[in-house]
Amino acid sequence: MTQAPSSYGTRDPNVFSRGSLKFTYELLRENDAELALIIDDILQSDPLPRAEESQDTKSRDTEAQNTEARDGTDTDDSASDHFKITLDPMQIHAILEALFRHDEQYQDTQNICQEIMGQALIEDWMKLAYQMLAEQPKEQQSSTVH
C-alpha cells in the first residue's frame, strides 16, 4: 500500500499526512468499513522517512525523549508522518465517491469546520486521481474518458 521513495515532497499528490488519512478514516468508517480498513492499513504501515533534521531538532528530540523517560509523558511526533498512497484507481474512485456522499449527507450541519476540512480532503484525493489519470498510457486514457 505504501512505499518509501528516496525523496518525496509533502505536497506531492500521492503523499498524505497522518492527519489527512485519519480524517479520511473517520469519515469513511460509518458508511464504508471496507474502505476505512484500507485507510487504516496505510496508517498502520511504516511512514515515509522524514527529511534530514537539523542538529538543533535532534538535540530537542533527545531532550524530549529523556524527559519522557523521566516522567512517563508521551512526546510522540507521529502527527508529522507522511505516507505515499499506492492504491489502485478503483479504490481511489470508491474513496472519492464515499467522501462525496458523506459531504452531501452532512452539508446542512452546523459544523462548518468539519465541512471545510472535508472539502479540502476531497480536493487532496481529487489531485491524486488527476495525477493517476495523467500517468496512464495514452491508449488507456482514451478508453477511460468517454
Image (spheres, rainbow, N blue to C red):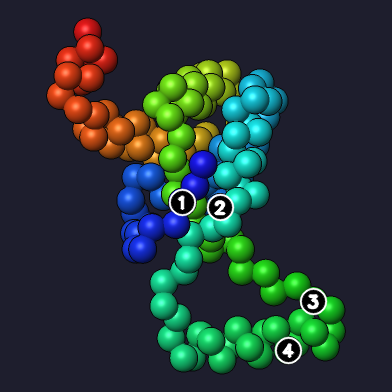
| Image coordinates for residue 73, horizontal then vertical, percent | 79, 76
Please, what is the three-letter code of the amino acid marked with disc 1? Gln
**Nearer the camera: disc 1 or disc 3:** 1
Q: Earlier in the sequence, mark 2 or mark 1?
A: 1
| Residue 29 appears in the figure | yes
At mark 2, the secondary structure is helix
At mark 3, the secondary structure is loop
| Quarter residue 38 falls in | top right
Q: Which mark is residue 85?
A: none
**Nearer the camera: disc 4 or disc 3:** 4
Q: Earlier in the sequence, mark 1 or mark 3?
A: 1
Residue at the image position 58 percent from the left and 56 percent from the top: 46
Residue at the image position 66 percent from the left and 90 percent from the top: 63
Q: Label 2, label 1: how many angstroms apart (C-alpha)? A: 15 Å
Please name the residue that numbered disc 2 is placed on.
18
Q: Label 1, label 3: how many angstroms apart (C-alpha)? A: 31 Å
Q: Earlier in the sequence, mark 2 or mark 3?
A: 2
Q: Which mark is residue 3?
A: 1
| Residue 119 appears in the figure | no
At mark 4, the secondary structure is helix
Q: Which mark is residue 66?
A: 4
Query: Dot 4: within a 10 Å radius of its alpha carbon, few (fewer than 14), some, or many (20 or more) residues?
Result: few
Tell which residue pokes out farthest to the left in this image: 138
Q: Nearer the viewer, residue 116 or 48?
A: 48
- Horizontally, residue 97 falls left or right of residue 9, namely right
Please, what is the three-letter code of the amino acid marked with disc 3? Thr
